[in-house]
Image (cartoon, rainbow, N blue to C red):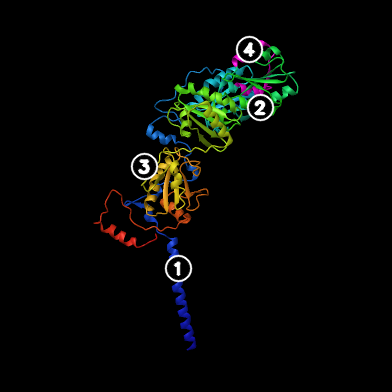
Amino acid sequence: MTSFRCFLVLSLVSFLLLSTVLPSISTNDEQDDEDLRFLEETEGKSVDIASLPHLSDSDDDQFPDDDEEDEDSGSEQETGASLSDPYKAPQIDDKDVVVLTQGNFSDFIKNNKFGMVEFYAPWCGHCQSLAPEYAAAATELKGEGVLLAKVDATQEDELAEEYDVEAFPTIYFLVDGKHTLYPAARNKDAIVTWIKKQIGPGIYNVTTLDDAERILTSESEVALGYLNSLVGPESDELAATSKLLDDIKFYQTMNPDVAKLFHIDPEVKRPALVLLKKDAEKICHFDGLFVKTAISEFVTSNKLPLVTIFSRESAPSIFESSIKMHLLLFATLNISEKYIPVLQEAAKLFKGKLISIYVQVDNEESGKPVANFFGVSGNGPTIRAYSGDDAKKFAMNGDVTFNNIKAFAEDFLAGRLKPFYKSDPIPETNNEDVKEVVGDNFDEIVLDESKDVLLEIYAPWCGHCRSLEPTYNKLAQHLRGINSLVIAKMDGTTNEHPKAKSAGFPTMLFFPAGKKSFDPMKVNTGRTVVDFYKFLKEHATIPFNLKKAVLVPKDKPTKTSDSKVREKSSSVSSKEEL
């Protein structure tokens, strides 16, 4: 009897324990195995998820997709030649450029101590622009014992692969078979100057007036040292400086008449140095200690014009300069003559501290992209400043006058300016499921501490962004009833904000409620509605519950006569969570 009673007690305890544990297990299993398939249905239609993009960061568009743009415009891209309109090479006298193939490449290296090789593609616009400059450099350097050669990389693919050619043109300088990338500008003078410095002493003697006059006539920028001796420590310092500066030719003389022709007082204390330019500021005299570092700093600070005209050719000298603070004038060509002299006068006050640049906004190739980057529209004149160290932009208010530019530049260098960020106009209405964010309403929408915000930074030309759009819209439709959650997007090409940094498009960022002072989270998840939903459930500061229901178009009434729809709506409306 006692055994029977013990059995009954144990059975009762076991039943009670199981009745407590089983619901918990069931609930956990249900949560782990949530049926999220309804998230892939919208407006009564199912969607094939396999057809939607699932992109890693490496797939994101960082630049305009030529192929995507080509679908709309039908324009020929530089990724290949049009079959219906093949590229026709212009007539260029390149008789002194050696044509290399797999068959004669090894002999070229073996038989020439120095050489330069350009890997090109016939359809490449940059290669076409380089061709006449390269040919002229080849003719001039032929007498120096340096041969320039070219390889059609579209035909010699094995050579291109061996030399890691990934872009056109790729230019190598070879010394005893060892190759290094050519780093200077792509024009005849730059190529000739750079190569002569690699094969020679880097500094040249000027002993006669005839030589001096020839140099002054033919060179656009020269540095001349007026020394006590053409050999020794002073000459060594000048030669060492020359090796550091690829785009300036250095000369030296002891001849007082030559010094005078170069605008140096023959009676001045030696060593002396002058930099001559064909610019508004033609002469710059050095007055520092005659050592490599000081001379290099002087030439670097003064070699650019007072105002550099921005172009494909001048861009390397701007961006590769050690001076990272830039002052930019934006104006159309027809009004530039009025304002460039104003900027030149102001630029004299800030030599060595900032680079002054003129951007022709009606130049489609070089000016307009820069204007778009700085958010400049219209004919100008407009003044902007740019800090290359932290990529911040600053806008000058007021008229383009000497005094205004001077005050603006002083405040810029002193760090007293507030950065400028591009913005589209704030939308008059913003009632869509995906909220439109621009630079000027970013704080109001994205940095609202009471909201969890998912933000897509996109580009209109980005193919991946267009592929993602229906998925993102569908996510916003499902979450439209969650007041604590905002699904938003921002055109990253025309809007900026310090909290919205993107390395490519699309960039997905999450801003948790109550934590907007911290950097946003980068959303590294799959790009389906379910993936985004799971991410938000896990990371949202404010918990939310989603009612499972059938989505219907806003512009179409619900078909109440459809018994299946009524049945499905009724069966799921009582289920609060998925």
Tag 4 secondary structure = helix
Q: Main secondary structure of the magenta part?
A: helix
Q: Residue at x 46, y 80 (%)?
A: 11
Amino acid residing under circle 2: Ser
Amino acid residing under circle 1: Ser
How far apart, in angstroms, are the residues tagged by discs 4 and 1? 96 Å
Marks 1/3 in contact by CB < 8 Å: the verdict is no
Tag 2 secondary structure = helix
Q: Position of residue 409 (x, y in %)?
A: 55, 31
Return the residue found at the far front.
403
Q: Position of residue 454 (x, y in %)?
A: 44, 49
- Which tag, 3 or 2, sits closer to the chain's start? 2
Of tags 3 and 4, the one toward the viewer is 3
Q: In the rendered image, which residue does mark 4 sit on?
A: 213
Report if residue 336 lies within the magenta region.
Answer: no
Q: In the rendered image, which residue does mark 2 sit on?
A: 296
Q: In the rendered image, which residue does mark 3 sit on?
A: 428
